[in-house]
Image: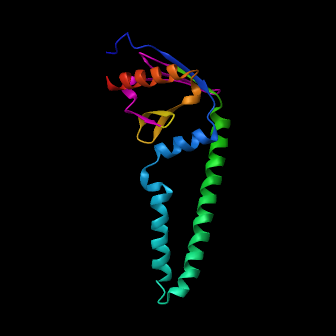
Amino acid sequence: MNQPSTPSFAFAGTLTLEEFGRVQKTILPVWTRWYVTTPLQAIVLFCVTGLPKEPSTWLYDLGALAVVLIAVQLTIRRARMRTWKQSVQIVGRVHGAITPDGIDWVTDRSTSRYEWAKVIAVKQADGLTLAFYAPRCAFYFPRSFFDSDETWTGFNLAIAAYVAK
């Protein structure tokens, strides 16, 4: 049972593109990040084209690799921007509170309440707190959703205490 001494905290805001990127980065597994996938793409490219015997021909392969990597990064960036715009259109402004009973999550189009028993983990990253209710599904709480640093710090302590119980 949750202790009544743990306070409630309200939050409100709209997710920015930068915050959306941090949410995605924190939710996705490490192997999907560029510093893991880039060497894998290089290995695949060299396996497909074969390693040339003369180092002077490596320049063409490295150029092709650079073009592919730039195209992949631009595609990822464009997809992230598009997904963020769709997310903001669908979700809009988020507000609610964490209480001893759970998370009250209210958007422009929906209202939901999740009990603490349904929250499986809390992960804190730089200026961001995620409350996971499934392996890759989470409520996001960026620092911008809170009025002050004291409120942000208190929120993080409270949500960690609620989930730990």
Give the quadrant of residue 59: bottom right
| Placement of 155 over or under 43, stated as above or below | above
Residue placed furthest toward the top: 4
* Dominant secondary structure (helix, strand or loop) of the stretch shown in magenta: strand
Q: Which residues are magenta?
A: 98-125
Residue at point 44%, 13% (across, down): 7
Q: Position of residue 55 (x, y in %)?
A: 50, 86
Q: Is residue 117 left or right of residue 46?
A: left
Question: Does 12 appear in magenta?
Answer: no
| Quarter placement of the C terminus | top left
Camera-nearest residue between 56 and 111: 56
Q: Position of residue 109 (x, y in %)?
A: 63, 28
Residue at point 47%, 59% (across, down): 35
Question: Does 117 appear in magenta?
Answer: yes
Q: How many marks?
A: 0
| Placement of 45 over or under 70, stated as above or below | below
Residue at point 68%, 37% (across, down): 89
| Quarter placement of the N terminus | top left
Q: Position of residue 6 (x, y in %)?
A: 39, 14
